[in-house]
Structures are given as C-alpha cells and as structure tokens.
C-alpha cells in the first residue's frame, strides 16, 4: 500500500470514529420510541451515532440535554443543564464551604448508570472556577481556570 492510500485510509478511520449526524428516520424505531416516551416535549432534536450508540441533543424546558442510548433504547448517559434552583442542597453546600460568595455561571448534571456528577462553573472576584461533585455533594475535582477567555 502506498503512502497516499495509507493516508486516505487513516483519514477515513479518523472521520468515522467521531459521531456522524443522522436523520431521525434512520434511527431504529425502538430507540426513537424510548426517547419519545421519556422526553415527549423535546424540541430541536439532533441525532448522531457514536461508537454504536445513539446520541441525541435536544432542548426541554429551555434547557439543553444530551442523551446516549444503546440500540435497544436503553439510556446509557444523560447530561442536562440545570437552573440554580435545581441544584441539590448538599451540592451547593459543598460549593459554599469552599467559598462563601460566588457568581454561578453554569450547572450540568450527568447521570451514567447509578453515578451522578454535577459540573459547576462559578466566578470569584472575576476569576472562573470549575468544580465537579458527586450526587451527594462530595468534591470530586476542583479546577481554578484563571486564564479562561470569555
């Protein structure tokens, strides 16, 4: 195999390893039905297939969601934006224990199997921080992001 053919093959493999957009009509009915049963009011859906799993991005109640389903329609992972009022008390308490006064920027909740992780970005004195906490509010990771571009 010459170098050019090898390069073309590598590009094809690299492109195919990322998610590929697909029309909902090309998603198996069992997957679409499972999604629609759980998220009947979803809007602005965009489907992809990634590594044999179906990934759908959608909006529900003015919040962004990402959902991964297997080919039987089982939910593998669900990531969603949250309003500040939806953050569990134990989670916000951990953030407040790290810093009393902060401006909340974004909150995401990810559920994968029985594991729940909250990802929160907040600002202290015009400096951004990222924090990851489990479903009970236990600190998993804290990362100040002092040089983040806005």
Image (cartoon, helix red, strand yellow):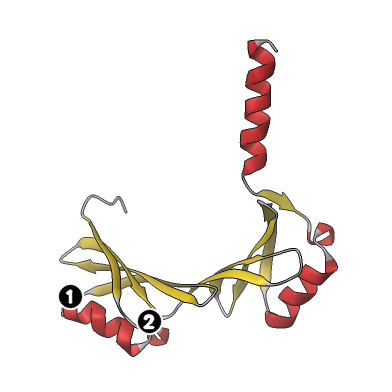
How many callouts does the rendering have? 2
Rendering coords of residue 67 (x, y %): 61, 68
The quarter holding residue 138 reads bottom left
Q: Mark 2 packing: few (<14 Cα in 10 Å), some, or many (20+)?
A: few
For the N terminus, the image quarter is: top right
For marks 2 and 1 on the same chain, the one whose residue lies earlier in the sequence: 2
Q: Image height check: is 136 above or below 48?
A: below
Q: Image height check: is 92 above or below 119?
A: below
Q: Image height check: is 83 above or below 31?
A: below
Q: Residue at x 72, y 74 (%)?
A: 35
Q: What residue is pinned by disc 1?
A: 98
For the C terminus, the image quarter is: bottom left
Q: What residue is pinned by disc 2?
A: 84
Q: Residue at x 64, y 37 (%)?
A: 15
Q: Nearer the viewer, residue 91 or 70?
A: 70
Rendering coords of residue 118 (x, y %): 39, 73
């Amino acid at each position: 195999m010459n170098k050019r053919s090898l390069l073309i093959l590598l590009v094809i493999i690299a492109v195919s390893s990322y998610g590929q957009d697909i029309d909902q009509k090309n998603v198996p009915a069992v997957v679409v039905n499972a999604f629609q049963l759980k998220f009947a009011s979803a809007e602005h859906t965009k489907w992809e297939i990634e590594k044999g799993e179906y990934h759908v991005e959608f909006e529900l109640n003015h919040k962004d969601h990402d959902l991964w389903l297997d080919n039987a329609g089982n939910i593998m992972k669900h990531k969603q934006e949250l309003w500040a009022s939806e953050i569990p008390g134990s989670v916000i308490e951990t953030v407040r224990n790290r810093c009393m006064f902060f401006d909340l920027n974004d909150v995401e909740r990810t559920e994968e199997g029985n594991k729940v992780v909250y990802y929160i970005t907040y600002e202290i004195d015009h400096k951004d921080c990222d924090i990851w906490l489990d479903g009970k509010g236990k600190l998993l990771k804290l990362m100040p992001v002092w040089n983040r571009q806005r």
